[in-house]
């Protein structure tokens, strides 16, 4: 058996590879149409690779990145949380109001928000594990609870945050180009990927999502795995949300539920090869998928196509991904049938 | 011997899923009556009932679709988007001098078309309906934005709400027909009753429930799932279309954000009304009671001048309570 | 110390069924003990008790001389007891090595998942087995035989003292069977306790030292392989008193013309199946689990695709795409799994009886005719003496026997025109009294002119109820026996024929 080529072959046949090719093609298109390269100029400086464009691209991706990490791992473990946008809104509201009304240092409130996020995660795990609620209905319900509490805290208006130290988090950039928060998000993706592929906990997540009974039989505590995943999901969401506050200098009762970064994140996760039924996939696929979605958006913007085509493209991408999954499964099934005959 | 009627009306009622819900509803009414009284306002007024019904009109149409689909074990998350699209279509048609009845027909036809498209990809490619309709809702939303900009004079293709004026449509949306109740509410009640009867009394409805209860057994007993699934998604799309058209008529505007809140209200009502998420159990009657509970809550809260945020919170909690009720009922069943 | 696993007076009941009754035997280290019995003899239940998946109602388990209590399979594993399940418990998206070491993945000093070490350890196991499997390949990409070997490696890796193989050779080819047998011999030499469950007599003679025979949940006897013969074993498995149940059956003796003519039927699961059923005839389909009987039934009913061959019903060639087509042509099927495939558990008796005739019990074209449906259900309840206070009870609240009668009532209600009735394990999990009732019903159906196909894993039942028995093995028909000539011995011999 040719072992050397296996790792590459696996990558080349995976979703990540296909997405990477799409991404590269998209970037080339973006550069060609937006910069002076066709007129003998440099690809940089103007258009797609301009500092302004790239930086705004990166900032847009911060919230979905963090949500994606939690959701991706949760989905691999066989669960889902549809309340992340509402959760982020709640944590943001909590943070902003505490900053306004108390004299606690910002990092204390930051940590308090993270603790509340962990409790929310525990609550979701309790509902799913103990009360056997279907995860996605329960989290839809909790969504409106969180939105309501956030609205009540904020009194349905924006609450500004003007703590200079806190605001400087989002302002910090590396090489005057890459925002620190974006970098942290990307690092988190790789940490998650590392956890999933390199730790026994990560492998147990795949096992629990793939076949819960067999996992329990092998002595894996699937309940604990699920609980940890829900907690991580909420904590990551909280991080993403607070960075968003730092970026926009305010907590907004509707911004996150309105722009639905959770749907962007969920779409990226599924486009990136995490099956809805759990037990398969990774985190690099979703990262590339998110990049594809954002760059596609960028290309459409450069083409002066209206932004709504982006919405359309995301949905269409999701449907196309599902159809490709189906065709692959069908091919395998046919091959199996042929083998039987 | 084999006759449920001998059990007596109350005993039968008591065994129904709807029973605890009716208690909940009565409890709510008492609560708000006392509360409102203490605050010096009146809950027991025809206007309250009118407000409740007005408030639930558009979500109720979505409940018809969501409830019937859930009975069969499916879900349509694109319904509210389809509704908004149809509202835009109505407005667009009126602005382009299409007669009002034709505008309605065209709009609802779009709803049915999207429903059929959903059904096609779900039955053909065997997608989980949850994901497929989630994806479709993005697609439809994109198309809607595009459509709203089409030939609207602004020239630059910006998506926009479309305002229009049409007396007939305004009347349909706002004019009172019986006592305090507008034509729009009456249409909702009539259509709701029709579909409740279809689900409860026709062979189609019976098949839907059998299919949701156990798709494998239903297939082996000669019930073809494909056609039923198709019809259900078409109903869902069509009803969303009706809701969107009526909403646009009432507002005299095709709004890009129309019905966005109604999606989950519709779903919550169905679950609260005892339609099991796994499918097969419950009916649209229960879902209606569920909707009443939800909206009595919202209106009651406003009569008592309670913060709208609190009512959002309670809306969510009601769904959790509904799930908990279902859990305890199932737990009791497991013990049997 | 000498290893052993002993069962003392194990008993277990399920609602309405006595699954195991006073089972006692001792499996000793250094020996291979075979557990043999017909389908439904209680082997699976016994294995589940032995590994903590089920709790026995009576009796005790004794491990190496000490009584133990097992609450779940994990505890069994911790105590050195591994069962290789017939239904493989693998995670398809994980690699071979991760499946083998699931729950005990090796860690590096930093607490990370130690891939290099895992590859090494797994490769060592694979080399022990001598199989061409890549440790990093996903299990879902392997063929079934190799998947089964991975399942076996899981138990091998744990180095358990007690190992039970449940029909492990079923998906294997000769190559792997040889590897497995070498492994078992090695484990035996190491003094481990091996329990080997199989239908394949030749394998039992090859590998086992002792044979424990079970029958109807009871212990029959322990035999030494060296001193016994195949014929004696078969006699042990089937020898039981056949009560008057069968003698008193009023059966139909007038057959009509051929109703169902199956020619060279081929589906993904069965091959070259050819047989005929006449009007008024009860044809039994016998065979061991997995022989393809259910699959033949499903193909006749339009539930599985037909790849080749013809099904001729009443002289007309059929082409059923859905069960609905089969039903309207007059074919009916009582599926083997009442709960999952037969009934909608949380609907009423009435709805379940009327299920296939929803389109016929209508008034005004679209409305369900409640009165007609009630009538149908009332008649079914009266005809089959279904024990229930009302037809508005959900079927989940009925006993197994009554549930089965609801399905019979469904296919024989007045609006159905059933010509061919297929009964797949109609007496599974049903008490003796109701079984006798159902046998008489089967004969009555024949008398009414239906062609009946009767599938059962209980040999006594098939050879006494059916007029003619078709025996299957491994997706093929291996023989046909008339009722007068049928003995459990000759049918079983055909069912085990290689």
Image (cartoon, coloured by chain):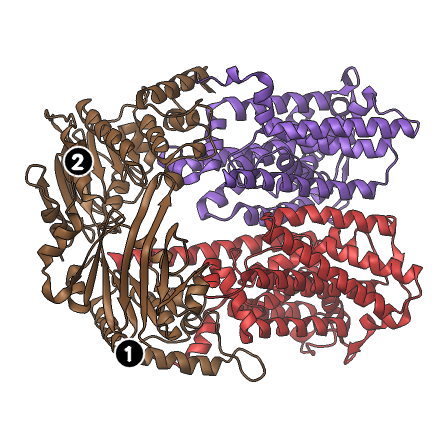
Chain colours: A red, B purple, C brown
Q: Earlier in the sequence, mark 1 or mark 2?
A: 1
Q: Position of residue C262 (x, y in %)?
A: 17, 39
Q: Is residue A273 visible in this depiction of the protein?
A: yes
**For the residues tagged 1 and 2, is the chain the same?**
yes
Q: Quadrant of residue C482?
A: top left
Q: Position of residue C401 (x, y in %)?
A: 34, 33
Between marks 1 and 2, how big is the CA–CA gap?
47 Å
> In front here: B192 or B300?
B300
What mark, if any, has residue C243 been given in the picture?
A: 2
How many residues crowd mark 2 within 10 Å: few (<14), some (14–19), many (20+)?
few
Determine whether A60 is above or below A323 in the image. below
Q: Is residue C167 visible in this depiction of the protein?
A: no
> In front here: A333 or A151?
A151
Asked if the residue under mark 2 is in contact with the one under mark 1, i.e. CB atoms within 8 Å, the reply is no
At horizontal 67% and vertical 62% (from top left) the residue drawn is A231
At horizontal 58% and vertical 17% (from top left) the residue drawn is B9
Residue found at the very far bottom of the displayed protein: C109
Left or right, B103 with respect to C122, comes to: right
> In front here: B170 or C207?
C207
Left or right, C478 with respect to A123, comes to: left
> In front here: A56 or B311?
B311
Q: Position of residue A235 (x, y in %)?
A: 71, 64
At horizontal 78% and vertical 32% (from top left) the residue drawn is B251
Residue placed under numbered mark 1 in the picture: C190
The number of discs equals 2
């Amino acid at each position: 058996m040719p072992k050397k080529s296996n790792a590459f072959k696996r990558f080349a046949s995976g979703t990540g590879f296909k997405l990477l090719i799409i991404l590269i093609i998209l970037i080339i298109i973006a550069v060609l149409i937006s910069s002076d390269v066709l007129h003998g100029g440099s690809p940089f400086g103007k258009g797609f690779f301009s500092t302004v464009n790239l930086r705004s691209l990166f900032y847009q991706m911060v919230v979905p990145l963090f949500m994606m990490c939690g959701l991706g791992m949760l989905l691999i473990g066989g669960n889902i949380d549809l309340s992340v946008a509402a959760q982020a809104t709640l944590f943001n509201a909590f943070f902003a109001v505490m900053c306004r009304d108390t004299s606690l240092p910002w990092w204390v409130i930051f940590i308090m928000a993270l603790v509340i996020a962990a409790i929310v995660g525990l609550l979701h795990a309790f509902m799913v594990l103990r009360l056997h609620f279907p995860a996605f209905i329960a989290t839809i319900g909790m969504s409106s609870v969180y939105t309501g509490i956030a609205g009540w805290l904020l009194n349905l208006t924006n609450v500004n945050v003007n703590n200079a130290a806190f605001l400087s988090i989002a302002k910090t950039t590396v090489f005057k180009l890459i925002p620190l928060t974006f970098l942290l998000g990307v690092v988190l993706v790789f940490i998650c990927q590392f956890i999933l592929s390199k730790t026994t906990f990560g492998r147990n997540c795949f096992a629990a999502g793939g076949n819960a009974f067999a996992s329990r039989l092998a002595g894996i505590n699937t309940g604990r795995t699920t609980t940890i995943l829900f907690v991580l999901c909420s904590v990551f969401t909280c991080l993403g949300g607070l960075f968003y506050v730092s970026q926009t200098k305010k907590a907004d009762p509707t911004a996150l539920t309105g722009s639905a970064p959770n749907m962007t994140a969920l779409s990226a996760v599924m486009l990136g090869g995490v099956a809805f039924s759990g037990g398969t996939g990774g985190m690099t696929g979703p990262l590339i998928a998110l990049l594809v979605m954002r760059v596609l958006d960028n290309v459409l913007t450069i083409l002066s196509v209206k932004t709504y085509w982006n919405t359309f493209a995301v949905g269409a991408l999701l449907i196309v991904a599902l159809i490709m999954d189906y065709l692959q499964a069908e091919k395998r099934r046919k091959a199996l049938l042929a083998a039987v005959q | 011997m084999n006759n449920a009627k001998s059990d007596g009306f109350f005993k039968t009622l008591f065994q129904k899923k709807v029973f605890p819900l009716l208690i909940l509803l009565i409890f709510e009414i008492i609560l708000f009556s006392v509360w409102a009284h203490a605050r010096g306002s009146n809950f027991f007024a025809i206007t309250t009932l009118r407000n409740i019904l007005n408030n639930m009109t558009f979500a109720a149409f979505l409940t018809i679709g969501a409830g019937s689909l859930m009975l069969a074990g499916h879900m349509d998350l694109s319904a509210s988007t389809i509704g908004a699209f149809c509202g835009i279509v109505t407005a667009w048609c009126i602005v382009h001098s299409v007669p009002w009845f034709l505008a309605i027909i065209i709009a609802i036809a779009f709803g049915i078309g999207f429903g059929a498209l959903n059904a096609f990809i779900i039955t053909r490619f065997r997608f989980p309906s949850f994901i497929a309709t989630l994806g479709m809702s993005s697609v439809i939303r994109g198309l809607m934005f595009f459509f709203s900009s089409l030939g609207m004079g602004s020239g630059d293709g910006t998506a926009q709400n479309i305002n229009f004026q049409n007396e007939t449509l305004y009347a349909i949306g706002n004019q009172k027909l019986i006592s305090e109740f507008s034509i729009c509410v009456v249409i909702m009640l009539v259509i709701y009753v029709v579909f409740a009867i279809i689900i409860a009394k026709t062979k189609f409805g019976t098949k839907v429930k059998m299919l949701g209860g156990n798709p494998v057994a239903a297939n082996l007993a000669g019930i073809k799932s494909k056609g039923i699934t198709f019809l259900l998604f078409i109903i869902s799309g069509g009803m969303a279309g009706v809701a969107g058209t009526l909403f646009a008529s009432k507002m005299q505007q095709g709004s890009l954000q129309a019905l966005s809140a109604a999606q989950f209200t519709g779903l919550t009502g169905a679950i609260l009304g005892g339609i099991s998420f796994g499918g097969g159990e419950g009916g649209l009657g229960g879902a209606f009671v569920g909707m009443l509970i939800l909206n009595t809550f919202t209106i009651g809260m406003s009569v008592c001048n309670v913060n709208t945020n609190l009512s959002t919170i309670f809306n969510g909690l009601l769904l959790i309570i509904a799930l908990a009720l279902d859990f305890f009922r199932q737990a009791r069943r497991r013990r049997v | 110390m000498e290893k052993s696993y002993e069962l003392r007076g194990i008993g277990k009941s399920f609602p309405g069924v006595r699954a195991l009754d006073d089972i006692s035997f001792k499996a000793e280290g250094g020996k291979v003990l075979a557990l043999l019995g017909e389908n439904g003899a209680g082997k699976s239940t016994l294995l589940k008790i032995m590994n903590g998946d089920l709790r026995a109602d009576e009796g005790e388990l004794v491990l190496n001389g000490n009584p133990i209590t097992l609450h779940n399979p994990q505890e069994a594993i911790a105590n050195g007891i591994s069962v290789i399940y017939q239904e493989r418990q693998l995670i398809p998206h994980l690699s071979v090595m991760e499946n083998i070491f699931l729950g005990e993945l090796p860690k590096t000093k930093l607490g990370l998942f130690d891939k290099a070490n895992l590859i090494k350890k797994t490769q060592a196991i694979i080399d022990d087995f001598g199989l061409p499997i890549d440790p990093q390949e996903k299990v879902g990409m392997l063929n079934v035989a190799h998947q089964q070997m991975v399942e076996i490696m899981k138990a091998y890796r744990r180095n358990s003292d007690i190992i039970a193989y449940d029909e492990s050779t079923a998906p294997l080819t000769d190559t792997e069977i040889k590897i497995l047998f070498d492994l078992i011999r090695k484990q035996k030499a190491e003094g481990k306790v091996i329990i080997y469950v199989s239908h394949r007599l030749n394998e039992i003679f090859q590998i086992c030292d002792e044979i424990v025979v079970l029958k109807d949940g009871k212990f029959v006897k322990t035999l030494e392989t060296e001193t016994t013969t195949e014929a004696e074993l078969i006699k042990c498995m089937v020898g039981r008193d056949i009560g008057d149940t069968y003698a008193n059956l009023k059966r139909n003796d007038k057959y009509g013309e051929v109703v169902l003519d199956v020619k060279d039927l081929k589906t993904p699961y069965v091959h070259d199946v050819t047989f005929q059923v006449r009007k008024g005839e009860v044809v039994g389909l016998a065979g061991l689990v997995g022989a393809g009987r259910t699959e033949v039934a499903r193909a006749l009913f339009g539930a599985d695709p037909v790849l080749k061959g013809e099904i001729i019903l009443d002289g007309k060639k059929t082409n059923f795409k859905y069960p609905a087509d089969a039903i309207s042509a007059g074919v009916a099927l009582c599926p083997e799994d009442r709960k999952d495939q037969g009934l909608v558990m949380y609907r009423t008796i009435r709805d379940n009886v009327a299920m296939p005739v929803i389109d016929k019990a209508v008034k005004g074209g679209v409305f369900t005719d409640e009165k007609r449906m009630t009538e149908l259900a009332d008649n079914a309840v009266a005809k089959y003496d279904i024990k229930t206070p009302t037809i508005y009870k959900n079927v989940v609240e009925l006993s197994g026997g009554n549930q089965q009668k609801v399905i019979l009532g469904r296919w024989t209600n007045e609006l159905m025109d059933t010509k061919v009735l297929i009964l797949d394990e109609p007496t599974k999990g049903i008490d003796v009294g109701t079984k006798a009732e159902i046998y008489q019903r089967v004969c009555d159906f024949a008398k009414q002119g239906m062609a009946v196909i009767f599938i059962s894993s209980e040999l006594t039942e098939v050879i006494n109820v059916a007029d003619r028995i078709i025996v299957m093995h491994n997706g093929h028909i291996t023989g046909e026996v008339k009722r007068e000539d049928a003995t459990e011995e000759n049918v079983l011999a055909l069912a085990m024929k290689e």
